[in-house]
Image: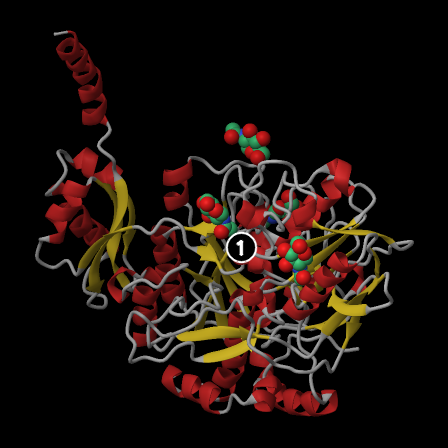
Amino acid sequence: MKSTISCFLLLLIVVPILASSVEKKVYIVYLGQHNNGEKAFHEIEKTHISYLLSVKESEEDAKSSLLYSYKHSINGFAAKLTPDEASKLSGMDGLLSVFPSHGKHSVQTTRSWEFVGLDEGDSYSWEKLKMGGEDLLSKAKHGKNVIIGVMDSGVWPESPSFSDQGMDPTPKSWKGICQGGVAFNSSNCNKKIIGARYYVKGFQNAYGPVNATEDYLSPRDIDGHGTHTASTAAGRQVSDVAAFGGFAKGTASGGAPLARLAIYKACWAIPNQPKADGNTCFDEDMLAALDDAIADGVHILSVSIGTAKPLPFEHDVIGLAALEAAKRNILVVCSAGNSGPAPGTLSNPAPWIITVGASSLDRAFFAPVKLGNGLKLIGQSVTPYKMKKMSPLVYAGDVVVPGVPQNVTGQCLPGSLDPNKVKGKIVVCTRGAGLRVGKGLEVKRVGGVGFVLANAKANGNEIACDAHLLPATALTYDSGIKILEYINSTKNPMAVVSPGRTVLKYKPAPFMAGFTSRGPNVVDPNILKPDITAPGLNILAAWSEASSPSKLPEDKRSVKYNIYSGTSMSCPHVSGAAALLKAIHPDWSIAAIKSALMTTGNILKFRDMIFTRSVP
Ligand SMILES: *[C@@H]1O[C@H](CO)[C@@H](O)[C@H](O)[C@H]1NC(C)=O
Ligand SMILES: *[C@@H]1O[C@H](CO)[C@@H](O)[C@H](O)[C@H]1NC(C)=O
Ligand SMILES: *[C@@H]1O[C@H](CO)[C@@H](O)[C@H](O)[C@H]1NC(C)=O
Ligand SMILES: *[C@@H]1O[C@H](CO)[C@@H](O)[C@H](O)[C@H]1NC(C)=O
């Protein structure tokens, strides 16, 4: 009896809550293409609302559930629906697909825990590169008539890479706008950044209003990622720049330094999470951005965004929008993803996209660690801090606080190290879980004087260089084993870490970065992907001055240029190279451009197209 009563009570309480909160998710309802010019915008929106009316109770309900009505090239809408409403809609005539928004795509350096930052490419023969490069550049007039749309985390418009000094007026074909917002107004656009917009409805639907201390409600970039990718594709030639600490000093330049940029901000900082953990880009926001970009008149779209796992074509908004772009001869270049080396991890698998993997340059940042037995291991680092003397060396797994799970004991995750056992010592941490820069921070937090990051087996020889907050170096897998063997071999292991220095003509180069996502293309194994590789390991480019080189909240340093890694960095190299080809051959189809890039992309020729570089 008693239990019946409590059940009854429970029901009374639960039922009303359920009724009022059947979960509404955002769904993308895709109708295919528009018949060009057939309908006015308000009629298109009316059609979209009429679909909603058939599942919602009132017109008010229908209108308030609508986040976006896509009107230009993409025909569809994004709306808040219950699963029931979505399934009713998906049975209707005229709808190609109805699918839940994949909430969280990320810019493809979010695997920042697997990310580095070296720098841009100098090469086998600088003279040769310069000749080939200058020739191509001048034939292409530095890309001045080409408009590259960049969908990312926005832009830091004050960077010298976006100066419009001496540039011709904006091309007449341009139909975009410069959308104002927080810390951004029409004065922030110029003849280089000819357009800027932002898309936030999906983000705000999920997280609430943008918190002004966490992001700018405007095209301004608080992260650095969007500024980096935009300047790699089309930044001006700026001499005498360097990363924090003076690394990679030289001239920075985008692939097509006089091409125009149109900025589409669709990626936002995740609330209550360090920027270093990455940001998020919602399907519905990206679709709106791409719909506008196509209508605005971009020639090339550079999209360094993807999913951790491949999506089927009919649920892949970047792929769907890219198809509409391709029909209009707009080239879409996307990053392959940073989920390697595991197989089948590739994102952006559609055949009408150029999908870009990431490889190394022949530049390194030598930062040797000298051991007490005299052995010197050549690590790499873009951290400039000096260590005064030999100090005791420990392996992180031997100095953890109780309760750290066995499988992550050597990894220096936040809170895992014991200050009593670390103070005054150099700590060897291994890669795996957690942010690389976060591991260095943990060593610093507990009073360590130096930090050695050892690759896990999966990372191989791909060296992770970051601007750490204390003297630091990073080792290949083989060198990592050697330092651990040394620690095991003696009672009082000692070491000293030297600051990094920039080294050119490093070999072997290029090699594929371990993080670059791999085929096979699980969505359609008949289509081989990635299509091409480009420099993506340790790339120097412009940065947001509202960010720090490590993006950690504890990091108060500010830089104009930063070294970063990912297929996010390689993608805009190809966008810039494509812009030059487009400028030389305005009549070529995008298929011809893609074919030319892929079939001439041997090591040297591809290098001829790569100008984001640092010249000694
Ligand atoms: C844009 O903002 C800047 C700085 O606040 C201001 O000086 C400038 O007048 C503004 N321009 C326009 C067109 O509103
Ligand atoms: C905004 O973000 C800051 C920093 O993350 C946080 O301290 C603050 O509480 C947030 N404000 C709101 C209204 O959430
Ligand atoms: C470590 O093991 C725990 C539980 O056994 C698991 O949840 C976690 O994902 C593992 N972490 C890593 C990095 O493998
Ligand atoms: C160092 O010693 C530990 C404990 O004996 C062992 O588990 C580990 O494999 C050794 N490491 C190397 C690289 O020899």
Image quarter hosting the C terminus:
bottom right
- Residue 191 visible here: no
Left or right: 556, with 3 as reference point = right
Which sits in the foreground, 487 or 613?
A: 487
Which sits in the foreground, 462 or 398?
A: 398
> Which residue sits furthest right?
388
Residue plotted at (77% across, 66% down): 247
Q: Quadrant of residue 121?
A: bottom right
The x, y position of residue 237, in whole percent, is: 69, 73
Q: Read off the residue under disc 1.
A: 154
Amino acid type of the residue tagged 1 in the rendering:
Gly
Q: Quadrant of residue 122?
A: bottom right
The x, y position of residue 561, in whole percent, is: 70, 61
Q: Is residue 68 above or below residue 174?
A: above
- Residue 354 visible here: yes
Q: Is residue 107 above or below residue 605?
A: above
Left or right: 403, with 518 as reference point = right
The x, y position of residue 438, in whole percent, is: 64, 48
